[in-house]
Amino acid sequence: DTAVSQTPKYLVTQMGNDKSIKCEQNLGHDTMYWYKQDSKKFLKIMFSYNNKELIINETVPNRFSPKSPDKAHLNLHINSLELGDSAVYFCASSQEALAGAWEQYFGPGTRLTVT
Amino acid sequence: SQQGEEDPQALSIQEGENATMNCSYKTSINNLQWYRQNSGRGLVHLILIRSNEREKHGGRLRVTLDTSKKSSSLLITASRAADTASYFCATGIKAAGNKLTFGGGTRVLVKP
């Protein structure tokens, strides 16, 4: 039973194309996140949604647009892909069980390569 | 710069030895978490320590938190080859939307 799943696992595309990555969690969590991990393994948060409401919106180009149709899904659409968008994108979810404590569950990642 | 900075960046030890890595951060936090990432995989949560806690244990893991020094350490005792992975600290701030900010990670190689 996969807790947080992402599709596709690999995505190879050309500059200028538009692509989407999908994420689903079956943990019943209220909050979902998108992270970008670059080639040096730095992991940076991009967005988070809580119950379909955008909570965190880091400094990310407008070409990136998250969409949360319901609290179990958070998709990431990227317009006009650029070489610098090549990275591994991780989806995660969390639920605050105790005050000040929320662990995140990560998906397996989507490796995006822009050529 | 990253909120969490880890030290060392890489660590190579023999099976059975202990591995210690440190994390420093800059601002007040609600919790600090440690995650493991195996090559080509997603991150796996290891342990969470809240800002009012000083030490936490979980199996072969021991985490300390010193909020006055804004630092944490992760100790893995009696390491195994399967512990080979990258380890990340992440600082959690509730007021920022339950945001986690990750450090650059420590790459640990455990040689059999």
Image (spheres, coloured by chain):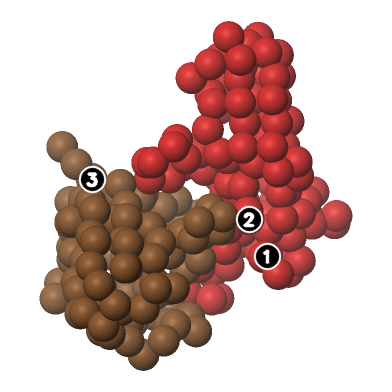
The structure residue drawn at horizontal position 23% and vertical position 59%, both measured from the top left corner, is A11
Residue A64 x/y as whole percent = 32, 82
Residue A79 relative to residue A99: left or right: left
Marked residue chain, label 2: B
Q: Residues within 10 Å of mark 2 (few under 14, many from 20)?
A: many
Q: Which chain is red?
A: B
Residue A25 x/y as whole percent = 21, 55
Q: Amino acid at mark 1?
A: Gln
Marked residue chain, label 3: A
Q: Amino acid at mark 3?
A: Ala
Q: Are marks 3 and 1 on the same chain?
A: no
Toward which corner of the image does residue A82 lie, by quadrant? Answer: bottom left
**Pointers 2 and 1 in contact (CB under 8 A)?**
yes
- Which tint was used for chain A? brown
Residue assigned mark 2: B103
User: Is A101 located above or below residue A66 in the figure?
Assistant: above
Residue A97 relative to residue B36: left or right: left
- Mark-to-mark CA distance, 2 and 1: 7 Å
Residue A111 relative to residue B90: left or right: left
Residue B5 relative to residue B80: left or right: right
Residue assigned mark 1: B3
Which mark is in front, 3 or 2? Answer: 2
The structure residue drawn at horizontal position 63% and vertical position 11%, both measured from the top left corner, is B15
Task: Point out the image quarter for the N terminus of chain B.
Answer: bottom right
Residue assigned mark 3: A3
- Mark-to-mark CA distance, 3 and 1: 28 Å
Upstream in sequence: badge 2 or badge 1 = 1
